[in-house]
Image (tube, rainbow, N blue to C red):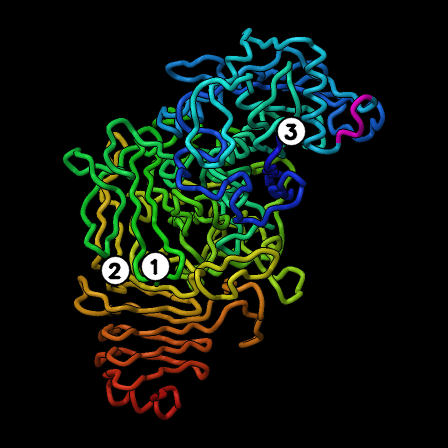
Amino acid sequence: MRTVITILFALLVVGTRAQGVPRDRQGTPIATGAAPPAVPADTSGIRSEHGWFLSPHGTLRVLVLFAEVVYDKEPERDPQPEGADHWPKGHLPVWKDEVFDPQPLAVPRAMVTRYYHDISLGRFTVLGDHVDRLLRLRQSEYGSLRGANDLSRAAVAEANKLGALRTAHRLSVADFDLWKDARTAGAAKEAGPDSPHSYDHVMLIVRNSGLTHGQGSTDPGSSGPLFGYESDTQSRFGGMNALPFEILKHEFNHLLLGGNNFHSGGGNASQFQSHFIPLQGGHSMMGGASCALLTCCGWDRDRLGWRADGAPYRINARTVDGRWADGDLDPAAGDTGVFVLRDFVTTGDALRLHLPGLPDSIDQQWLWLENHLGTARNGSPTDRFHWEADSRCITPMEPGLFALVQVAHEQRSGPDTYKGHADYLRPLPATGLFDLRLRGDTLPSDCPFPGGRSMPFFADAPEANPLSGSHELELPVYDRDGDGRIDRREHYIPGTRIADGRTQAQAVFFGRPEHAFRMCGDRVIGLATNPGSANQMTLVSAGGRSVYKGRAPDARMVVLNGLRVELLAQAADGAATVRVSNDDNVVDRDVRWCADSIVLPPLHGRGGTGLTVERGARLLLDRSGTPTRVDRPEEAFGRTWYSGPTRFTVMPGAALLVRSGAALELVHGTELHVLPGATLRMEDGSSMRTDRSSRIVLHANAVLDLPAEMLRRLEERKALERR
């Protein structure tokens, strides 16, 4: 028997808990972010595109075992004693042939086979077949069967009673041994059979176990000889309610991508060290029941080397005249222009923009853009909102650009390939970020599950917080137990959105059409928009404790930039035309900026030199009502804060210009620091307001150009400090 690491994940469904950690051969938990113990000292051949323990290229065939537990010792523990229509007691499930296609088809029919065909752009074919008998696992013979590994061992032992392998489509052991066992995680995988044969992957699905539904685990190992042969990798899942697609693909994707520190896109759990304080939703291959879209994202494809035929670049887009264009952009270095993104799922087109300004010691960030047309347009069954097909209350996805931010996880070769922290992808919905507030009650709701409750929340314009707020595709946190520390278990699921007095939508966490950037809605990401173009604040934490104590590599500052992304057109065939520029230095609307530290570097663009607040606009610098730290709460201004007062720093060579008819406002302890060589200029006819807790700090030879009366009032109120 060979067992290296177990990756266990109890799929997050509303009100349930996810759990599981990787363990070594002795069963000792491995620290999140640690390299798997199978990786030897020589890691020169490690590459992410090789896959962790399975190759994400070529063809692989899975052997499936279906089983049920016979609770002849503890009948009260049977979670489904009478079976269900989709899986009658004592029989194979109705959907037994809908999991994998046994042989390749031009257009796959089975759900999992089609999923991998679509997300890999045809580069990875996952086939499968099942043993044609239901395995009945009796407690009187195999014990309590409480553990996942106990179920696997019992199923192998019970299957061996059949004498020989017989599958529904009469395949042989050789048909399930297409790859040699990969003993080194991330190393190149060799096609061909093992000697003796070894199944590439054995998958157990149980009707009525303690795994119930949406729970399972996977590992690179074996539960003993099955019809005389071991397995290279294995998994086991509960299938009590339906074909367990979400947990199945999540766990199988571990074997391609990495350990629990690769949880993302709605597949993470509270206990894992993660880049963001709230658990993230959105979409990725590691998504689970908390994902919004069921398909993959651009980061997944880049990580595994999945590109379209003839694609010449690592990340690919098109020019307006149809030529290939490099989609991996650094706008601050001049990578700007107009690009065309065809359907992401079927062509692989995407843009990735490096977010400038973060020091090298800080985890770097990138903005991804993908044009999703949806199932109705591209025919891909999983390019849709998760519960769209199962619930009439979920509005179907509409074509548009979906945006997400990548944090770190850029190492694709060498010994650090499988290190890092979870939730390295943060969706950026077009609906924006806010200091979200619960109304305090719940509403009966059957969306997306019958008999549920929805939590109404406020997302009001005055509470917009594009730099440090929360959004609808994550699980916002608050100090629910009042212990002075925030654990991401203390979250709520955004349910019914109330914006500026109007109830707008329900079940928003599971995806809404307005989360995409569309011509009929929000279509710009820039300096003054919500969401904006600046980097995200990060804080690697777990259990209510930060790992790096607010130091590098966490991004504890927000660096403003001139990046602007504008959706120019959506063609009849679904293609999106996008302009990327780096000259956005204008605040042309009311904005509220909050973050522990906001940095204004020298900017140049359509507003001239510096950051310009235009006539009719207001720049409000405020304190974030959304937690930016997990401890050290502070009582001030009649409330409890899990954030620091905003410090806005105008860097040397930078300028902040407030035009006539525009306003600058500082509240809740904000400090505006003008460093040596920087400029703050207020034109005649502009206005400035600072509350008694806020001030402007002028350093050395910084330039302060204010109307005389404005300067007098600041000095009179002691709101101006010179250093």
Residue 144 is one of the magenta-drawn residues = yes
Whichever of callouts 3 and 1 sits on the residue coming sooner in the sequence is 3
Describe residue 518's horizontal placement relative to residue 67 as left or right: left
Foreground label between 2 and 3? 3
- The amino acid type found where label 2 is placed reads Gly
Q: Which residues are magenta?
A: 141-145
- The amino acid type found where label 3 is placed reads Gly
Say if residue 532 shows up in the picture: yes
Residue wearing tag 3: 238
Residue 168 is one of the magenta-drawn residues = no
- The amino acid type found where label 1 is placed reads Ala
Foreground residue among 235 and 72: 235
Disc number placed over residue 166 in the picture, else none: none
Counting from the top left corner in percent of width and height, residue 334 is at 19, 54
Q: Quadrant of residue 415?
A: top left
Residue lying furthest front in this view? 42
Note whether 498 is above or below 307 in the view shown: below
Residue wearing tag 2: 562
Marks 2,3: beta carbons within 8 A: no
